[in-house]
């Protein structure tokens, strides 16, 4: 069972992989070395930002001045959402009210949690657009001194 006080603070992303039904190897959506922050506050608010490491810079240009393909590249290498959270047993429920993906807004994201020392593993399952089951596994490392 997870307790709120166990989560409070900041966490850095170590790994994110997705296991797809019917595939032998997991997919790493943001590469082998993704970058990310996950923050849980004592008053029940959470925020998560994830991205591919080594994203290309914009050379000082505004995102509004990029080509359509450049904007797509920026969008496809970053993910974020925030809102309140609650804990039910070993499941953390993120109540999303701000998100890069508008479909997440108003949704509850259920994440099974396993806390071992300073490592937090969050897993969640869903059905993709092709009807296949997929399971996300994100591993987070607690940031020392960030509680």
Image (spheres, helix red, strand yellow):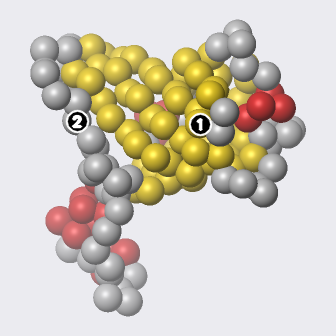
Q: Is residue 23 left or right of residue 58?
A: left
Mark 2 or mark 1, earlier in chain? 2
Q: Which mark is residue 119?
A: 1
Q: Is residue 137 above or below residue 63?
A: above
Q: Is residue 77 above or below residue 5?
A: below
Q: Nearer the viewer, residue 58 or 111?
A: 111
Q: Is residue 63 above or below residue 141?
A: below
Point 32% across, 81% down: residue: 58
Residue 89 x %, y % = 70, 10
Badge 2 element: loop
Q: Nearer the viewer, residue 64 or 5?
A: 5
Q: Is label 2 in contact with label 1 (beta carbons under 8 Å)?
A: no
Residue at numbered disc 2:
27
> Is residue 88 visible to us here?
no
Point 35% across, 62% down: residue: 53
Point 38% across, 39% down: residue: 16
Q: Residue furthest top?
A: 89
């Amino acid at each position: 069972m997870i307790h709120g006080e166990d989560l409070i603070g900041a966490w850095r992303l170590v790994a994110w992989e997705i296991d797809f039904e019917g595939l032998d190897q997991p997919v790493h959506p943001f590469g082998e070395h993704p970058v990310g922050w996950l923050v849980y506050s004592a008053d029940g608010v959470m925020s998560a930002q994830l991205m591919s490491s080594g994203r290309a810079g914009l050379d000082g240009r505004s995102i509004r001045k990029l080509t359509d393909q450049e904007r797509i590249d920026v969008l496809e290498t970053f993910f974020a959402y925030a809102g309140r959270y609650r804990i039910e047993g070993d499941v953390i429920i993120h109540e999303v009210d701000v998100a890069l993906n508008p479909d997440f807004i108003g949704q509850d994201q259920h994440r099974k949690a396993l806390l071992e020392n300073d490592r937090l593993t969050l897993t969640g399952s869903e059905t993709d657009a092709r009807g296949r089951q997929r399971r996300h596994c994100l591993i987070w490392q607690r940031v020392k001194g960030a509680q």
